[in-house]
């Protein structure tokens, strides 16, 4: 049986053209793509529909509210589709892939996200190959999860990260594949969902030698509700730095959910391996295990946008809700 796929364009390099200010969204892109996809040999077995978000964005301009708008469009326009192919800029593609994995209930349809490093308007573009590969992946039976297709590889969306600024194999999923997402798990972990809450403010802080407590204070004073901290190695921090540790404790005590992920590309956080990690656990920092930065930030963002129940969010951050984290 033929499958119906919706291509939803959000912008990004794939749909750009050269302008005097550099690459910028091309208003004629979708028309050209439609002509190419109309060739029956391009996407065998698929009926393809097209839609576009406005405005088309360089994904550097994507904000958390855009993730919610994209999720709503996928839910609305994808009603009659068997799958969605989302075209997106590569810069924040891994954030959107992770965010959608938490925002969309994994019961309706598979979503694959792709883009390109070189605009489709250029001769040597990787865009068409990525679109064709992603469509072929949607033509097969696929779990109803969020995936990234890029450079000939299909990866679980909330495990991916951008690893190359211009190479065509731009994405990787370095910390394991992750299991398929299943319906109902996120809501089960978060019993007191409050509809209509605004998107939360979540920050990201990379540790570096010499970091001061004032840096943490400034972030917390900006009104953050959640903070992802990129710790050293197995989840370690400068526990001898009393100003820094006191500022972190103040953050946790004022209700900021602080989650530790690792600066390393491989492995995971274990706050109980070193005394310098244990010190973080003792003041209430939560282990993000092997979550990518993108998964941790978007998971915290989505959970804090669903409830004001801080202990429930803290607990849910330690659970595997969408195959985004390995619980050992
Ligand atoms: N700056 C572009 C974007 O993220 C890069 C790309 O698409 O490859 O939209």
Image (tube, rainbow, N blue to C red):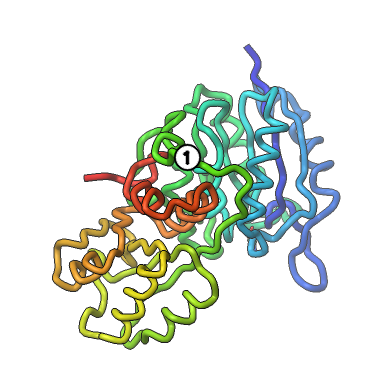
Residue 81 image point, x, y percent: 67, 25
Camera-nearest residue between 182 and 191: 191
Residue 304 higher or lower than 18, as above or below = above
Is 126 located above or below residue 254 in the figure?
A: above
Would residue 58 appear left or right of 322 to someone viewing this image?
right
Residue 78 x, y percent position in the rendering: 68, 30
Which residue is painted at 48% across and 81% down in the image? 218
Residue 169 visible? The answer is no
At a point 54% along the width and 51% down the height, the residue shown is 305
Image vertical order of residue 313 relative to residue 38, above or below = below
Residue 202: percent from left, percent from top: 50, 63
The answer to whether 233 appears left or right of 60 in the picture is: left
Q: Nearer the viewer, residue 32 or 309?
A: 309
Residue at screen point 85% across, 49% down:
28
Which quadrant of the render holds ligand 1? bottom right
Which residue is labeled 1 in the image? 154
* Above or below: residue 183 compared with residue 162: above
Q: Quadrant of the C terminus?
A: top left
Mark 1 surroundings: few (<14), some (14-19) or many (≥20) residues within 10 A:
many
């Amino acid at each position: 049986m033929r499958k119906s796929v919706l291509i939803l364009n959000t912008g990004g390099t794939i749909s750009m053209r050269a302008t005097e200010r550099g690459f910028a969204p091309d208003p004629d892109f979708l028309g050209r793509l439609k002509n190419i996809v109309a060739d029956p040999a391009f996407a065998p077995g698929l009926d393809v529909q097209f839609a576009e978000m406005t405005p088309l964005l360089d994904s550097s301009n994507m904000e958390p509210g855009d993730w919610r708008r994209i999720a709503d469009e996928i839910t609305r326009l994808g009603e009659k589709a068997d799958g969605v192919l989302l075209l997106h800029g590569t810069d924040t593609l891994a954030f959107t892939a992770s965010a959608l994995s938490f925002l969309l209930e994994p019961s309706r349809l598979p979503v694959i996200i792709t883009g390109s490093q070189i605009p489709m308007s250029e001769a040597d573009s990787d865009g068409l190959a990525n679109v064709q590969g992603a469509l072929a992946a949607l033509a097969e039976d696929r779990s109803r999860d969020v995936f990234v297709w890029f450079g000939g590889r299909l990866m679980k969306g909330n495990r991916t990260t951008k690893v190359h600024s211009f190479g065509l194999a731009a994405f990787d999923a370095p910390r394991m594949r992750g299991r398929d997402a299943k319906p109902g798990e996120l809501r089960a972990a978060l019993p007191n969902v409050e509809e209509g809450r605004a998107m939360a403010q979540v920050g990201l802080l990379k540790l570096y030698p010499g970091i001061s407590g004032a840096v943490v204070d400034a972030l917390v004073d900006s009104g953050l509700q959640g903070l992802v901290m990129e710790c050293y190695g197995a989840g370690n921090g400068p526990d001898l730095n009393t100003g820094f540790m006191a500022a972190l404790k103040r953050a946790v005590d004022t209700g900021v959910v602080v989650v530790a992920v690792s600066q390393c590309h491989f492995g995971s956080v274990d706050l109980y391996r070193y005394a310098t990690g244990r010190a973080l656990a003792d003041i209430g920092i939560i282990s993000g295990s092997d979550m990518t930065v993108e998964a941790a930030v978007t998971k915290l963002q989505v959970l804090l946008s669903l409830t004001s129940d801080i202990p429930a969010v803290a607990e849910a951050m330690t659970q595997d809700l969408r195959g985004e984290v390995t619980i050992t």
